[in-house]
Image (cartoon, grey):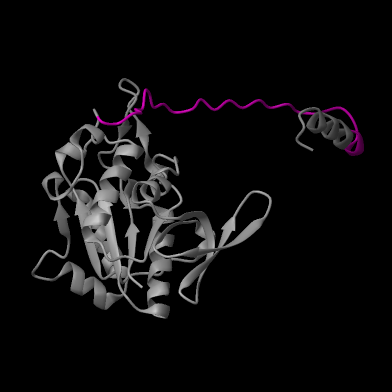
Amino acid sequence: MNIIVCIKQVPDTNEVKINQETGTLIREGVQSIINPDDKNALEEALSLREQAGGKVILLSMGPFQAKDALKEGLAMGADEAWLLSDRAFGGSDTWATATILAAAIEKIGNYDLILCGRQAIDGDTAQVGPEIAEFLGIPQITYAKEIAVEEGKLRVTRLAENADYVMTVQTPCLLTAIKELNEPRFPTVSRIFEVYDGEEDPIHVLTFDDLNVDPTQIGLKGSPTNVKRSFVPVKEKKTEIIEGISEKEKAAVLTEKLMALKLF
Protein backbone atom coordinates (compact mmCIF):
# COMPACT_ATOMS: atom_id res chain seq x y z
CA MET A 1 0.00 0.00 0.00
CA ASN A 2 1.50 3.30 -1.12
CA ILE A 3 0.55 6.13 1.21
CA ILE A 4 1.06 9.88 0.76
CA VAL A 5 1.09 11.86 4.00
CA CYS A 6 0.58 15.63 3.83
CA ILE A 7 2.37 17.41 6.66
CA LYS A 8 2.78 21.07 7.56
CA GLN A 9 5.48 22.87 9.51
CA VAL A 10 3.79 25.20 12.00
CA PRO A 11 4.95 27.51 14.78
CA ASP A 12 4.65 26.10 18.28
CA THR A 13 1.46 27.93 19.25
CA ASN A 14 2.44 28.00 22.92
CA GLU A 15 5.02 30.60 21.91
CA VAL A 16 3.17 32.56 19.22
CA LYS A 17 2.91 36.32 19.69
CA ILE A 18 1.04 38.95 17.71
CA ASN A 19 2.53 42.18 16.37
CA GLN A 20 0.08 44.69 17.86
CA GLU A 21 0.76 47.26 15.12
CA THR A 22 0.36 45.00 12.08
CA GLY A 23 -1.86 42.27 13.58
CA THR A 24 0.36 39.56 12.10
CA LEU A 25 2.06 36.60 13.74
CA ILE A 26 5.61 37.11 14.97
CA ARG A 27 7.46 34.02 13.72
CA GLU A 28 11.04 35.14 14.29
CA GLY A 29 12.64 33.20 17.11
CA VAL A 30 9.62 30.89 17.43
CA GLN A 31 10.29 27.16 17.29
CA SER A 32 8.68 25.31 14.37
CA ILE A 33 7.22 21.82 14.71
CA ILE A 34 5.36 19.24 12.65
CA ASN A 35 1.65 19.93 13.01
CA PRO A 36 0.50 17.50 15.77
CA ASP A 37 -2.42 15.93 13.86
CA ASP A 38 -0.09 15.40 10.89
CA LYS A 39 2.19 13.35 13.15
CA ASN A 40 -0.75 11.09 13.92
CA ALA A 41 -1.34 10.75 10.18
CA LEU A 42 2.31 9.81 9.64
CA GLU A 43 2.30 7.29 12.48
CA GLU A 44 -0.77 5.59 11.02
CA ALA A 45 0.84 5.47 7.59
CA LEU A 46 3.92 3.79 9.04
CA SER A 47 1.76 1.27 10.91
CA LEU A 48 -0.27 0.46 7.79
CA ARG A 49 2.94 -0.01 5.80
CA GLU A 50 4.16 -2.48 8.42
CA GLN A 51 0.92 -4.43 7.98
CA ALA A 52 0.39 -4.25 4.23
CA GLY A 53 3.78 -3.32 2.75
CA GLY A 54 4.35 -0.51 0.26
CA LYS A 55 5.92 2.87 1.02
CA VAL A 56 5.20 6.12 2.83
CA ILE A 57 5.72 9.40 0.96
CA LEU A 58 5.77 12.77 2.72
CA LEU A 59 4.47 15.91 1.03
CA SER A 60 4.64 19.47 2.32
CA MET A 61 4.34 23.01 0.98
CA GLY A 62 6.34 25.91 2.34
CA PRO A 63 9.72 27.65 2.34
CA PHE A 64 12.96 25.67 2.46
CA GLN A 65 12.75 25.82 6.24
CA ALA A 66 10.02 23.17 5.96
CA LYS A 67 12.73 20.66 5.04
CA ASP A 68 13.33 20.33 8.79
CA ALA A 69 9.83 18.91 9.28
CA LEU A 70 10.24 16.56 6.33
CA LYS A 71 13.58 15.31 7.64
CA GLU A 72 12.00 14.59 11.03
CA GLY A 73 9.32 12.60 9.22
CA LEU A 74 11.98 10.65 7.34
CA ALA A 75 13.76 9.96 10.62
CA MET A 76 10.50 8.56 11.97
CA GLY A 77 10.50 6.06 9.10
CA ALA A 78 9.01 7.58 5.93
CA ASP A 79 10.52 6.44 2.62
CA GLU A 80 10.41 9.63 0.53
CA ALA A 81 9.84 13.35 1.05
CA TRP A 82 8.71 16.05 -1.36
CA LEU A 83 8.67 19.81 -0.74
CA LEU A 84 6.58 22.24 -2.79
CA SER A 85 8.35 25.57 -2.64
CA ASP A 86 7.95 28.57 -4.93
CA ARG A 87 7.23 32.27 -4.47
CA ALA A 88 4.17 31.73 -6.66
CA PHE A 89 2.68 29.61 -3.85
CA GLY A 90 3.05 32.36 -1.23
CA GLY A 91 -0.11 33.67 0.40
CA SER A 92 -2.25 30.71 -0.68
CA ASP A 93 -5.39 30.10 1.36
CA THR A 94 -6.79 26.61 1.96
CA TRP A 95 -8.37 26.40 -1.51
CA ALA A 96 -5.18 27.43 -3.30
CA THR A 97 -3.04 25.23 -1.04
CA ALA A 98 -5.23 22.19 -1.75
CA THR A 99 -5.03 22.99 -5.48
CA ILE A 100 -1.23 22.88 -5.35
CA LEU A 101 -1.06 19.76 -3.17
CA ALA A 102 -3.55 17.91 -5.39
CA ALA A 103 -1.47 18.77 -8.48
CA ALA A 104 1.66 17.45 -6.75
CA ILE A 105 -0.11 14.24 -5.73
CA GLU A 106 -1.19 13.71 -9.35
CA LYS A 107 2.43 14.18 -10.43
CA ILE A 108 3.76 11.73 -7.84
CA GLY A 109 0.98 9.26 -8.69
CA ASN A 110 0.69 5.57 -7.80
CA TYR A 111 -0.95 6.02 -4.40
CA ASP A 112 -3.58 4.01 -2.55
CA LEU A 113 -4.18 6.29 0.38
CA ILE A 114 -3.68 9.95 1.31
CA LEU A 115 -3.47 10.78 5.00
CA CYS A 116 -3.72 14.30 6.38
CA GLY A 117 -4.03 15.69 9.87
CA ARG A 118 -7.51 16.83 10.84
CA GLN A 119 -6.40 20.47 10.97
CA ALA A 120 -3.35 22.66 11.47
CA ILE A 121 -2.88 24.42 14.80
CA ASP A 122 -1.96 27.72 13.11
CA GLY A 123 -5.20 27.92 11.12
CA ASP A 124 -7.67 25.41 12.60
CA THR A 125 -9.75 25.30 9.41
CA ALA A 126 -9.80 21.51 8.76
CA GLN A 127 -10.36 22.33 5.08
CA VAL A 128 -7.23 21.35 3.15
CA GLY A 129 -7.60 17.56 3.43
CA PRO A 130 -11.24 17.44 2.25
CA GLU A 131 -10.50 19.93 -0.54
CA ILE A 132 -7.63 17.77 -1.81
CA ALA A 133 -10.03 14.80 -2.02
CA GLU A 134 -12.55 16.89 -3.95
CA PHE A 135 -9.95 18.12 -6.43
CA LEU A 136 -8.73 14.55 -6.99
CA GLY A 137 -12.24 13.13 -7.20
CA ILE A 138 -11.66 10.43 -4.57
CA PRO A 139 -13.73 9.42 -1.51
CA GLN A 140 -12.85 10.84 1.89
CA ILE A 141 -13.51 10.15 5.56
CA THR A 142 -12.59 12.77 8.14
CA TYR A 143 -11.87 12.47 11.87
CA ALA A 144 -10.50 8.92 11.60
CA LYS A 145 -10.23 7.33 15.06
CA GLU A 146 -9.34 3.78 13.92
CA ILE A 147 -8.19 2.42 10.56
CA ALA A 148 -7.99 -1.24 9.55
CA VAL A 149 -7.26 -2.99 6.23
CA GLU A 150 -9.97 -5.50 5.30
CA GLU A 151 -10.11 -7.40 1.99
CA GLY A 152 -8.62 -4.63 -0.09
CA LYS A 153 -10.72 -1.94 1.56
CA LEU A 154 -10.30 0.24 4.64
CA ARG A 155 -12.60 0.04 7.65
CA VAL A 156 -12.58 3.40 9.39
CA THR A 157 -14.06 4.41 12.73
CA ARG A 158 -15.04 8.06 12.46
CA LEU A 159 -15.37 10.21 15.55
CA ALA A 160 -18.50 12.37 15.74
CA GLU A 161 -20.06 14.46 18.48
CA ASN A 162 -22.76 11.98 19.46
CA ALA A 163 -21.30 8.61 18.41
CA ASP A 164 -18.57 6.74 16.55
CA TYR A 165 -19.41 5.67 13.00
CA VAL A 166 -17.82 2.62 11.37
CA MET A 167 -17.46 3.07 7.62
CA THR A 168 -15.90 1.09 4.76
CA VAL A 169 -14.15 2.84 1.89
CA GLN A 170 -12.48 1.68 -1.31
CA THR A 171 -9.00 2.91 -2.20
CA PRO A 172 -7.70 5.26 -3.44
CA CYS A 173 -9.14 7.54 -0.80
CA LEU A 174 -8.22 10.31 1.65
CA LEU A 175 -8.52 10.16 5.43
CA THR A 176 -7.88 12.83 8.04
CA ALA A 177 -6.38 11.77 11.37
CA ILE A 178 -7.12 12.89 14.92
CA LYS A 179 -4.97 12.53 18.04
CA GLU A 180 -7.07 9.61 19.32
CA LEU A 181 -5.89 7.52 16.36
CA ASN A 182 -2.48 6.61 17.81
CA GLU A 183 0.63 7.72 19.65
CA PRO A 184 3.36 8.92 17.23
CA ARG A 185 6.70 7.14 17.50
CA PHE A 186 10.07 8.79 18.04
CA PRO A 187 12.73 8.91 15.31
CA THR A 188 15.29 6.12 15.58
CA VAL A 189 18.99 6.85 16.09
CA SER A 190 19.99 5.00 12.93
CA ARG A 191 17.48 6.91 10.80
CA ILE A 192 18.57 10.23 12.32
CA PHE A 193 22.16 9.60 11.24
CA GLU A 194 21.02 8.39 7.82
CA VAL A 195 18.79 11.41 7.17
CA TYR A 196 20.83 14.21 8.70
CA ASP A 197 24.38 13.05 8.00
CA GLY A 198 23.94 11.80 4.43
CA GLU A 199 25.92 13.42 1.63
CA GLU A 200 22.82 14.00 -0.53
CA ASP A 201 19.77 16.08 0.35
CA PRO A 202 16.95 13.55 0.89
CA ILE A 203 14.23 16.09 0.06
CA HIS A 204 12.86 16.32 -3.48
CA VAL A 205 11.78 19.87 -4.37
CA LEU A 206 8.97 20.76 -6.79
CA THR A 207 8.31 24.29 -8.03
CA PHE A 208 5.49 25.94 -9.96
CA ASP A 209 7.08 24.91 -13.26
CA ASP A 210 6.92 21.24 -12.23
CA LEU A 211 3.17 21.23 -11.65
CA ASN A 212 0.12 21.51 -13.86
CA VAL A 213 -1.64 24.34 -12.02
CA ASP A 214 -3.47 27.45 -13.18
CA PRO A 215 -1.53 30.48 -11.87
CA THR A 216 -4.82 32.35 -11.39
CA GLN A 217 -5.94 29.73 -8.83
CA ILE A 218 -2.96 29.87 -6.48
CA GLY A 219 -1.02 32.32 -4.36
CA LEU A 220 -2.40 35.41 -2.70
CA LYS A 221 -4.16 36.74 -5.80
CA GLY A 222 -5.70 33.35 -6.59
CA SER A 223 -7.06 32.80 -3.09
CA PRO A 224 -10.81 33.43 -2.66
CA THR A 225 -10.35 34.12 1.08
CA ASN A 226 -7.85 36.11 3.13
CA VAL A 227 -7.12 36.89 6.77
CA LYS A 228 -8.38 40.39 7.56
CA ARG A 229 -6.86 40.69 11.03
CA SER A 230 -5.07 38.63 13.70
CA PHE A 231 -5.24 39.59 17.36
CA VAL A 232 -4.77 38.26 20.86
CA PRO A 233 -8.15 37.78 22.62
CA VAL A 234 -8.68 39.92 25.71
CA LYS A 235 -9.11 37.76 28.80
CA GLU A 236 -11.28 39.17 31.55
CA LYS A 237 -11.61 37.71 35.04
CA LYS A 238 -14.13 38.60 37.72
CA THR A 239 -13.83 37.39 41.28
CA GLU A 240 -16.58 37.28 43.89
CA ILE A 241 -15.95 36.16 47.47
CA ILE A 242 -18.90 34.73 49.42
CA GLU A 243 -18.48 35.72 53.05
CA GLY A 244 -20.28 36.01 56.36
CA ILE A 245 -22.29 32.77 56.40
CA SER A 246 -21.76 29.08 57.20
CA GLU A 247 -19.97 26.70 54.86
CA LYS A 248 -23.27 25.00 54.00
CA GLU A 249 -24.92 28.30 53.17
CA LYS A 250 -21.90 29.36 51.10
CA ALA A 251 -22.19 26.17 49.09
CA ALA A 252 -25.89 26.80 48.51
CA VAL A 253 -25.23 30.37 47.34
CA LEU A 254 -22.43 29.19 45.07
CA THR A 255 -24.69 26.50 43.57
CA GLU A 256 -27.39 29.06 42.86
CA LYS A 257 -24.93 31.36 41.13
CA LEU A 258 -23.51 28.53 38.99
CA MET A 259 -27.03 27.40 38.04
CA ALA A 260 -27.92 30.97 37.06
CA LEU A 261 -24.90 30.95 34.74
CA LYS A 262 -25.89 27.48 33.48
CA LEU A 263 -22.57 26.08 34.67
CA PHE A 264 -24.03 23.53 37.08
Count of numbered circles in the view: 0
Residue in the image at 67% along x and 55% along y = 163
Residue in the image at 16% along x and 60% along y = 204
Magenta residues span 222-249
* Main secondary structure type of the part rendered in magenta: loop
Asked if 37 appears above or below 79 in the picture, the reply is above
Give x and y (percent) for residue 161: 64, 48
Q: Is residue 147 magenta?
A: no
Instruction: Give the camera-side residue of 125 and 249.
Output: 125
Quadrant housing the N terminus:
bottom left
Residue in the image at 41% along x and 26% along y = 231
Res. 116 image quadrant = bottom left
Quadrant housing the C terminus:
top right
Res. 71 image quadrant = bottom left
Q: Is residue 69 visible?
A: no
Give x and y (percent) for residue 255: 84, 35
Q: Is residue 238 magenta?
A: yes
Does residue 96 appear left or right of residue 36 in this picture? left
Residue in the image at 36% along x and 27% along y = 227
Asked if 84 appears above or below 25 in the picture, the reply is below
Does residue 260 appear left or right of residue 131 in this picture? right
